[in-house]
Image (cartoon, coloured by chain):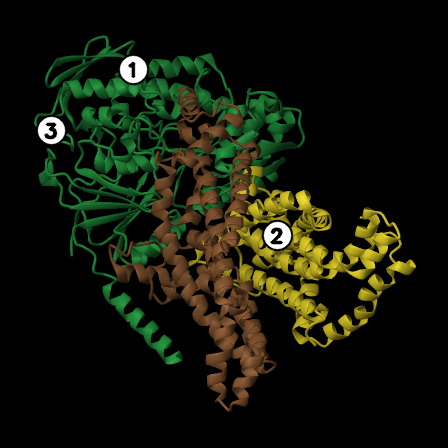
Amino acid sequence: MRRFWKGSALALLSATTLFAHAASAQTLTIGLAEDPDQLDPDRARSYVGRIVFTGMCDKLVDLDDKLNIVPQLATEWSWNDDQTVLTMTLRDGVTFHDGTPFNAEAVKYNIERSLNLPGSNRRNEISAVDHVEVVDGHTVKLHLKQPFAPLLAALSDRAGMMISPKAAEEEGENFSRNPVCSGPFKFVDRVAQDKITLEKYAGYWNKDAIHLDRVIYRPIPDATVRLANLQSGQLDIIDRAATSDLKQIRDDSSLKLESAVSLGYSGITINTDHGPRADNPLGSDPRVREAFELSIDRNIINQVAYDGEFTPDNQPISTQSPFHAHSLKSPVRDVERAKALLKEAGVDRVSIDLMATNSPEVMRVAQIIQSMAGQAGFDVKVTATEFATMLDSYDRGDFQAGLLNWSGRADPDGNLYAFLTCDGTLNDGEYCNAKLDEQLNKARRTNDTAARHEAYEAAERILLTDRPIIYLYHPNWFWGLSKRVEGFKPYPDGMIRLTNVSLGS
Amino acid sequence: MFAFIFRRVLIAVPTLLLISLMVFSLQLLLPGDPALALAGEERDPAVIEAIREQYHLNDPMIVQYGHWLAGVFTGDWGISLRNQMAVTDLLLSKLPVTLELAILAMLVALAIGVTAGLVSAVKKGTRWDFGANVIALSGISIPNFWLGIMLILLVSVRWGLLPASGYTSPLESVSRNLEMMVMPALVLGTAIAAIMMRHTRSAMIQAMQADYVRTARAKGLSERVVILKHAFRNALVPVVTMGTLQFGELLSGAVLTEQVFTIPGFGKLIVDAVFNRDYAVVQGVVLFTGTVFIVMNFIADLLYFLLNPRLRT
Amino acid sequence: MSATTQPMVQPPVAAPAMAAIERPGARVWRRFRHHPSALLGGTLVLAFVIVALGSPWLAPFDPAANDWMAIRQAPSAAHWLGTDDVGRDVLSRLLYGARASLYAGVLSVVIAFIIGVPFGLLAGYYGGLVDATISRVIEALLACPFLILAIAFSAFLGPSLTNAMIAIGIAASPMFARLTRGQVMAVKTEDYIEGARAVGASDLRIISRYILPNVFTPLLVQATLTIATAIIAEASLSFLGLGQQPPAPSWGSMLDTAKNFITQAPWMAVSPGVAIFIVVFGFNILGDGLRDALDPRET
């Protein structure tokens, strides 16, 4: 009996190690940090879902790694003089995965779906669009209610993803179970929390640049486990490697590391005017907020919580963006000055309830802030909350200050407008300053880069004085790759673009 | 016999209804709005309202319950708010995974538990018995998830013998599938092994004091034959019963093991659903596992009844 | 409960009941003392309680004080068990974490006891419709797997140590109810109960005077074993982020953090797990020993 068990255990072990590396050469397996939500570009809500869409759904325009807008399904575009009409020329010979041709009618259908579908998460992004005019088979005009500069950036993301009108009509609510787009890979199947499988679309317009036969996305929430699977060869690329694991990736001769500063940010949102909980020194006195900022050393947060791998900054606009204001520098930590400011504000010690999600990573940041601010006279109480409950608290104004991350958008408008304008949909602290609204609206109304740059810099100067959100850092994206993966290029938006990616031996 | 079955089924109905009501009413306690949790980082108010409409979240609780219950009977267990998949499909897609894990874990448990139970009963009162007991108690006392982490640390990270975690369907690759299931099955199996060991031990001790064993011994049969052929066969009845019950538990009890090894089974399904406020899924999993548990209970009773000659007459 | 009032007064009819626990008491203690594993369990549990209560004096560092010059340091003379991801002393957190475990283990069992026992008494004593109703609820609760039930409750109540305890307590209560019910039904038909009823004792009096003391010992064993389950459950919930909230230490949440640094700082993961193991082992072995010592069948 004992011999039998021993024998079979050995047989099992040797059999399994033998077959461990016999994966198909043309299948790329990507480890994602989360399981995406529904696979309908108009209804989707998660960052991670965008990574899967990138393999499956082409967009009207795309971003390059310098955040310039480049052609994808639209080959050319132009604005009229008062910037209210965007004329786009569409690529020839493009078909959706179900064979339906891609043309101006399809664009009209898609834009209208984004605007009108109940539960569309894209409406806000392109609400400036009044109507779509089909000029001819391959020309389309987007008529705007007023000039709206961030439109092209929105069309480089989910709002610009084209789905097959035929499939959308036939499937209705169930479209997300079997999405049909026009990208390099078509949807095969999905096992929730396990994998999403895509396979090469033979009719893809740019098929010569596609070298993979299959792509499998596997959600593995634990970063360490993702890395272990990369090392053992089960995964070829991992999304969002943990900063504490980077040394291991760098030291491993069979792996390589790619990275990019993200478009997102992490900051402390302060409740300045949302209900009774705003009624405290931090919420009502900008000097107290300044003192709070001065008590924090962004570099220490970065060093301790993220092994010095993130990008400390005091602005909402990524350092990668052409709109980043390089003249605005983060203040140096100054505990004495912070104490003086508190005295000036007429308070001795200030207690702050800091809300944060209960993940170990975020908790680390919260605890570092807690002890740094403590030295300057702030009694920070960290309240750990589950994500869903936290959103609820923000919505109801049931918070004093909270650590909040934003995954970031290509256009600065996506990092600012909804969070800080008086009527902004994500303005949890209900901060309101007409001068800021004016600058942010100005930046929306012109396509002139220099003018927009100026407006955003003016807006940021207001923010750095009022401090409704104290920005701390931009996360960096880190991808761990097997050495076999060739042609991978990191992008600040964090997407994994599969064009030109191949697997060597 | 039929009266017995009929009575059991009759009792199961109100129990299941109670489970469903209980599970449903949990929603009332929950902080956080599912529509808001779903709306993601954008939180567009129009979207939130649309979600509420679509999933009847604005209706009174009792209407929602009626809706859901009616669906349960017609095979429509609702739709996952998060990924738009039908709850029944989700359950069915997870069932083979959890089932496989449960079966493998049960094999581990039987191999270790029954052997250890047998040894400690035969050598009752000796060091062997004491040792087996300590091992069994250790099995119950080790937190599953920690054992899992330690195994990953040693076997995968240090020695690089087995993949750290994940899941491959046996349809894709049987060897890869087994390779990934070894550690989780071991982790889950050890906990159950301890329980199986104790039941085997006490059943064996009882059996060895029974008359027929004495008779067999008196007939001069070798101790080995007495133990294995006569005592063990009879001791199997409670062991099988217990095994059936434990199997029911295994189907749902692998929550943390699945979490540690990222195995997409019921455990992971419900944990993620709880965090995403995906009510329909939480309700589906609890109702399903509850039903399985009741069915397993029933089977255990039936087996006990059928295997026990004294009860059958 | 009224059972605790005047426990030593012995009315004539109570004699059999009291005798049933009084005389074996000494025997139980004798058997317990000579039961090696029970003694070991008792010692481990006692040590655990002392550590938990004495952690402020035993811990070399403040368990919440972070030191960003010393993050993720391996065990050394200064930090015997190393430091964690924000430079806190693992040993100190481990000692303080014992409090969360003790607190969760004991209080959730108290909650389970308070909810479960009265229902079990009612069901077992009155039988009929009361029993049928309560039994269905017990069965329904028992049909839902313990941990899933605890996860659901604590998620619905919101993550905190107190809520985790309540959740575990509620999830464990049907076990107590079922055990009590079974015991009551077994005891109910004894002669001395019949006798008490014959002399016109009220239900309340019969339950509190005669039944409860007789079902108390198996409940004590169950409670000891449930503390072990509850400690693991608390660690599990904290591991999932549903229990003790940071920065307060708990063994489960320490493991939750540690799993992210398993290659860089394995010491963070080892000690909390060993601690859980030792304590749970202690309670289990103590419960076993108690059961053996209290069980009149085995000699």
Name the chain letter of the residue that bears numbered label 2: C
Residue at which label 3 appears: A94
Task: Say left or right for A161 vs A402.
Answer: left
Chain B colour in the picture: brown
Q: Residues within 10 Å of mark 1 (few under 14, many from 20)?
A: many
Residue at which label 1 appears: A148
* Secondary structure category for the residue under label 3: loop
Residue displayed at 60% across by 37% down = A380
Chain A colour in the picture: green
Tell me, yes or no, if residue B105 can be seen here: yes
The amino acid pointed to by label 1 is Phe
Q: CA distance from mark 1 to mark 3?
A: 28 Å
Residue C105 is situated, as x and y percent measured from the top left of the image, at 64, 54
* Secondary structure category for the residue under label 2: loop
Which corner quadrant holds the N terminus of chain A?
bottom left
Residue C28 is situated, as x and y percent measured from the top left of the image, at 76, 71
Name the chain letter of the residue that bears numbered label 3: A
The amino acid pointed to by label 2 is Pro
Which corner quadrant holds the C terminus of chain A?
bottom left
Q: CA distance from mark 2 to mark 1?
A: 53 Å
* Secondary structure category for the residue under label 1: loop
Q: CA distance from mark 3 to mark 2?
A: 62 Å
Residue at which label 2 appears: C63
Q: Residue furthest front?
A: B313
